[in-house]
Image (tube, rainbow, N blue to C red):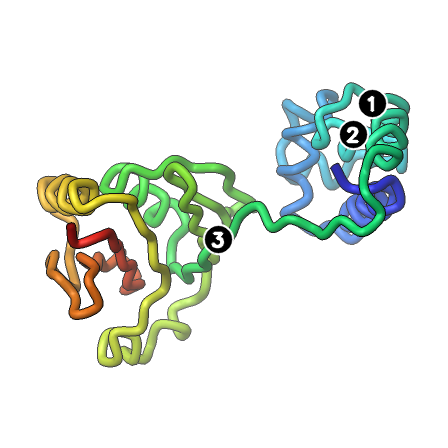
């Protein structure tokens, strides 16, 4: 858990985002603060949102019932943490730029077996999908961003995802083949001892899947 000063800063940041009508914060508020759970993004941004609400949001995100419980837990955690401990990076997400968030999430869920973690905005302009430990962030961009075909010409990858065994990479390829996914590269053995294949999403993003050759 983050230390108490960082948690206070987080609460103030959420409060500022709400005052500035920053749309992504509406989904976060709706998810974690019960009294906003039935409101739309616009209604949440128009409603009164106080520092106490922002603190409740932070507390619930950390797994506590409220700010008082969080403060008690944070103080206990701080007393048990080694002063020279280093931050631990817990996850990474590749960013893909897409023309249509819904069409993109449909592709990743129905074709590649991912699930939707969240979608922000009204209309949506940002979201995340995941499968096991692989996460892909999806960001809406207008048509002009896709004018050049440099990604296709240069085989520029948008993401690389790995599996743990030769059997899994073969199984995944066959599953995607059955789902009629478009491949930019079929399953093959690389000179460096891996098996890889690459799929192309509806926006031309190239996603490499890799696993051991043996």
Q: Earlier in the sequence, mark 3 or mark 1?
A: 1
x, y percentage for residue 204? 27, 64
Q: Earlier in the sequence, mark 3 or mark 2?
A: 2
Q: Could you tell me which residue is drawn at 70 percent across and 31 percent down?
A: 61
Q: Could you tell me which residue is drawn at 80 percent across and 45 percent down?
A: 10
Of residues 206 and 88, the one drawn nearer to the viewer in this rendering: 88
- Residue 89 shows up from this direction: yes
Badge 3 local density, few (<14 within 10 Å), some, or many (20+)? some
The image quadrant of residue 54 is: top right
Task: Using the image, tell me which numbered label, if any, was put on residue 93.
Answer: 3
CA–CA distance in space, label 3 to label 2: 24 Å
Task: Using the image, tell me which numbered label, if any, was put on residue 66.
Answer: 1
State whether residue 41 is above or below residue 104: above
Badge 2 local density, few (<14 within 10 Å), some, or many (20+)? many
Q: Determine the secondary structure under disc 2.
A: helix
Q: Earlier in the sequence, mark 2 or mark 1?
A: 2
Q: Could you tell me which residue is drawn at 78 percent across and 29 percent down?
A: 59
Q: Which residue is mark 2?
A: 59
State whether residue 35 is above or below residue 174: above
| Left or right of residue 13, residue 133 in this image | left
x, y percentage for residue 89? 60, 50
x, y percentage for residue 128? 47, 45
Q: Could you tell me which residue is drawn at 82 percent across and 32 percent down?
A: 77
Badge 1 local density, few (<14 within 10 Å), some, or many (20+)? some
- Residue 16 shows up from this direction: no
């Amino acid at each position: 858990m983050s230390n108490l000063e960082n948690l206070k800063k987080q609460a103030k940041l959420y409060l500022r985002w709400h005052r500035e009508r920053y749309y992504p914060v509406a989904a976060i508020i709706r998810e974690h603060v019960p009294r906003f759970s039935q409101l739309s993004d616009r209604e949440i941004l128009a409603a009164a949102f106080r520092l106490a609400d922002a603190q409740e949001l932070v507390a619930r995100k950390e797994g506590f019932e409220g700010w008082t419980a969080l403060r008690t837990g944070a103080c206990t955690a701080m007393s048990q943490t080694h002063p020279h401990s280093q931050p631990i990076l817990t996850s990474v997400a590749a960013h893909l730029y897409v023309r249509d968030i819904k069409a993109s999430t449909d592709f990743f869920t129905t074709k590649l077996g991912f699930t939707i973690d969240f979608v922000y905005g009204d209309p949506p302009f940002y979201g995340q999908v995941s499968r096991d430990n692989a996460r892909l962030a999806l960001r809406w961009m207008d048509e002009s961003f896709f004018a050049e075909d440099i990604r296709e010409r240069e085989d520029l990858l948008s993401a690389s995802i790995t599996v743990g065994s030769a059997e899994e990479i073969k199984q995944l390829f066959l599953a995607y083949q059955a789902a009629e996914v478009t491949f930019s590269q079929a399953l093959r053995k690389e000179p460096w001892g891996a098996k890889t294949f690459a799929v192309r999403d509806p926006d031309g993003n190239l996603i490499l899947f890799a696993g051991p050759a043996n």
